[in-house]
Image (tube, grey):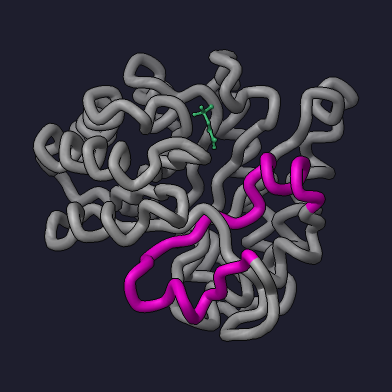
Amino acid sequence: MTKRKPIVAGNWKMFMGPEAGVELSNRLVHTYKSIAPLDVVICPPFVSMTEVGRVIEGTGICLGSQNIFWESNEGAYTGEVSAQMLSGWCDYVIVGHSERRHNFNETDAIVNKKVQAGLHYGINVIICVGESFAENSAGNTKDVVERQVRAAYRGVGHQEALQTVVAYEPIWAIGTGQASTPTVANKVCAEYVRGTLDNMYGHEVSSSVRIQYGGSINSKNILDFIEQSDIDGALIGGASLSAEDFSDILNSVGRHYLSD
Ligand code: PEP
């Protein structure tokens, strides 16, 4: 079986302006001591990225953006930030988060344009997919997740696909304290996400792309998820706003990787 390097990302959402962001990232840098090969990403709001980027420079912690615009360089797009502007100092971008799909009407087609824009400028893209409570209750998880994966990767080549990470985030589990069941989440990641990538790209790509679980992860439940065969890390909202909680999660993932 391919051993994939775990990846844990913290999505700060619309929290942590520049001052608070510097304080949190400083605490994280002092609290988290890497014990294993593990990709760690923090995604502050745009206004805090420069300052936070300075704090984490040279620490091995990567900077990510929570959003990107699909026009990849410059133009008259008030309020937007392009892939070109983010390239060079931003390693990752989150695309297709359910809060953007639902609050800002981001369709599968828009998600695809953003994925392509990020990849074009060499930014690693974390692609979020996941079903709503109603879709889950109606037994439509497979259809929804497979459709979202297929749409996000439309027109993306094999090499570029290797620069992506998929975050499976059931919407009903985000910020609710009600995480999915690890074995159920693993089935979605293995069959609906990795299986679809396998159909689209074949084994080399599908076995290399890392898949995160996201939705009410904390330091107590992370191990149950990371132990699963097809879950390679986590996308974390609430618990990433505490340096101590986030470090505990990172250390659990690191220890698991070493013992595996
Ligand atoms: C998220 O926002 O992607 C998320 C998973 O949030 P939380 O960890 O708070 O559920």
Name the image quarter holding the C terminus: top left
Residue 103 appears left or right of 256: right
| Residue 113 in the image, given as x and y percentages of width and height | 71, 72
Residue in the image at 80% along x and 65% along y: 109
Residue 254 appears left or right of 218: left
| Residue 90 in the image, given as x and y percentages of width and height | 37, 67
Q: Is residue 66 above or below residue 50?
A: above
Q: Nearer the viewer, residue 127 or 45?
A: 45
Residue 23 appears left or right of 136: left
| Residue 60 in the image, given as x and y percentages of width and height | 18, 56
Whether residue 212 appears in magenta in the rendering, the answer is no
Residue in the image at 58% along x and 65% along y: 68
Q: Nearer the viewer, residue 241 or 112?
A: 241
Q: Is residue 14 visible?
A: yes
Q: Which residues are magenta?
A: 79-105
**Image quadrant in which you'd find residue 131:** top right
Residue in the image at 51% along x and 36% along y: 213
Q: Is residue 237 above or below residue 219?
A: below
Q: Is residue 161 above or below residue 232?
A: below
Whether residue 80 appears in magenta in the rendering, the answer is yes
